[in-house]
Amino acid sequence: MLPEVRYALLALTAFAVAVPAQLLDAPAALTATAWVVCYVAGGWEPAWSGLRALRHGSLDVDLLMIVAALAAAAIGQSLDGGLLVVIFATSGALEAVMTARTRRGIEALLDLAPETAVLVRESDETTVPARDLRIGDVVVVRPGERVPADGEVVDGASDVDTATLTGEPLPRPAGIGTSVHAGTVNGTGVLHVRVDSDPADWVVAGIRDRVERATESSSRRQLLIERIEQPYSVGVVAVTLALLGIPLLFGAAFEPTLLRAMTFMIVASPCAVVLATMPPLLAAIAVASRRGALLRDAGVVEALAAVDTVALDKTGTLTSGLPRVVAVRAADPDALVALAAAAEAGSEHALGRAIREEASRRQLAVPAATGFAAEPGIGVRATVRGQMVTVGRPATPEAVEATVVEVRVDGELRGTLGLADDLRPGAADAVASLTALTGRTPVLLTGDAEHPAAAVAERLGITEVHAGLLPDDKADVVEAWRRDGRTVLAAGDGVNDAPLLAVADVGLAVGHGASALSVQAGDGVLLRDPMGGLPTLVALSRRATRVAKANLVFAGTVIAGLVAWDLIGTLPLVLGVAGHELSTVVVCLNGLRLLVDRSASRTPTVADRPSTRSEVAVG
């Protein structure tokens, strides 16, 4: 159990003992002990925090709340002071629980970049820390392993999955002379890579440095209450001292003067102001968590509410990151798919899996194949019904929106298959909803090529596309928007998106497969239904912020009324405390009602999208 929760429970328990003991005239020792435990358990932490802030020249609401509670106890109102302490301690415990829950959820997603490499020297292999590699070292990368360093392939052939760096959904062919980067994933072949740069100059290291610089240079996000608490607290203290000191200078009696000053401090205590904002923001975090969105803190909710520009990555964010068959050109499309699936039966390549899934979707009978062989970066071949079937990329691929593979039988071209990355369910509806919420159509920022990026944008109704971007380029676009006064929400999943998420006002990592660096750089993680839930998250944040502002107006009105009564007339202490505590409870409950409001967690309706598969029978 968190310390904040233990102390809050102890304070609440002591309060529950002290109140009936005081009302029933229990032994004074029991009542006094219960009140002391309540005050100490619930108040020591905010008191210590307030004293530390005071030592650095800042007066915050923590210390002011404790002073107000002690002032109430000093004039015989232990019940009122204890209630202040319990409410404040409970709010702090709730915030700690939500923050810890989010932190645990985020930490569980972090994956580790390769820390070791297999170094080859004179035919001997040695495992060494990747950070110790130097220019000229040769490392071996086996199938399925992450490339440990930036370098050039000097032996072997394979396909390398570069999605985390470039956003491309399909692996790139890699052979002798090909450049590869640390963090990318090797396919089915064995590669020998000669390191051509120091670890500090690797692409991944540059991305991490950009993230760190962006984090250090950006100012700490402040909650609305944090922006007003310092001048408010100073003002309350100043007025309290004036109410006490000025009348005494003119000969007023000490006891009624002290009573008026203490009454003012209690009714002006910022408990209602503090609880006006935190419960609705924390409730929004809880509701978002139920929907699979983990937000780091309450400040993210306020920032989300102000978003007017949305930047989206393509691969893994708007799309699933997995290719599928979208077009078949053949005299007999089903027969072509069956032949290709037979030849790909032994393949682990993403294209092979997509072709087999297409055959399964069509419920085709796939013939048996023998003599399977894969040529990394080229394609596969196998014997099917006594004929040699090959599936591979054309020698001169065209710049089209889909990846095209040829199917040949004994060297004769029988047809082609077009494969493309599939859109996430609800992506088009999410784009439309975000456009309605922000007044601007989301912008596509991707490292993928221009043609597939434009094709995805057209299907989603996105009009502004920036393709072929390096990680720093994405961050530069967002920084330019922010200089123009925009509030930017960015969503992405790969290592290449980390700088983008770091410089945006709100950065959200997408999916369980989000890279460790993008999770660390962002302000939260979208897990379940990331695109469908994004508009709901923005709408929820706006609603929570509206509730917080309404609470502030209500709490401020009550405080102003009580303060005016105390300054102009004579406010009975019991009425002042009652009005103050009632307003505190009202704003707290009003904020927490988001937890049980079904409309706050409503899932957007996702319209069925028309199929994008196409078939052309040629003869």
Image: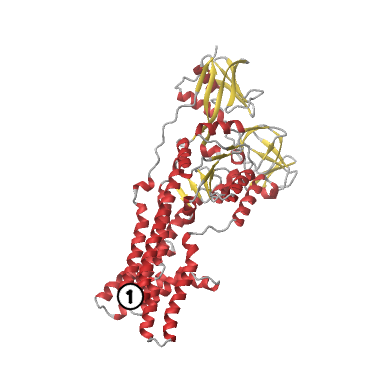
Most extreme residue toward the top, as rendered? Answer: 619
Most extreme residue toward the left, as rendered? Answer: 24
- Is residue 147 at least partly visible in the picture? yes
Snapshot quadrant of residue 165: top right
- Is residue 129 at least partly visible in the picture? no
Task: Give the quarter of the figure containing the N terminus.
Answer: bottom left
From what the image shows, is residue 543 above or below residue 269?
above
Q: Residues within 10 Å of mark 1 (few under 14, many from 20)?
A: some
Snapshot quadrant of residue 455: top right
For badge 1, the amino acid type reads Leu
Residue drawn at (65%, 35%) of the image: 190
Most extreme residue toward the bottom, as rendered? Answer: 251
Residue drawn at (69%, 48%) of the image: 199
Point out residue 179 in the picture as x, y percentages from the top left corner.
Answer: 70, 37
Q: Front-most of 190 and 464? A: 464
Residue drawn at (46%, 38%) of the image: 432
Q: Which residue carries the number 1 mark?
A: 571
Q: Front-most of 248 and 421? A: 248
Task: Give the quarter of the figure containing the C terminus.
Answer: top right
Point out residue 222 in the picture as x, y percentages from the top left corner.
Answer: 51, 59
Point out residue 51 in the picture as x, y percentages from the top left corner.
Answer: 50, 73
* Local secondary structure at mark 1: loop
Point out residue 538 in the picture as x, y percentages from the top left corner.
Answer: 45, 47
From what the image shows, is residue 535 above or below residue 75?
above
Q: For this view, does 289 lie left or right of residue 521?
A: left
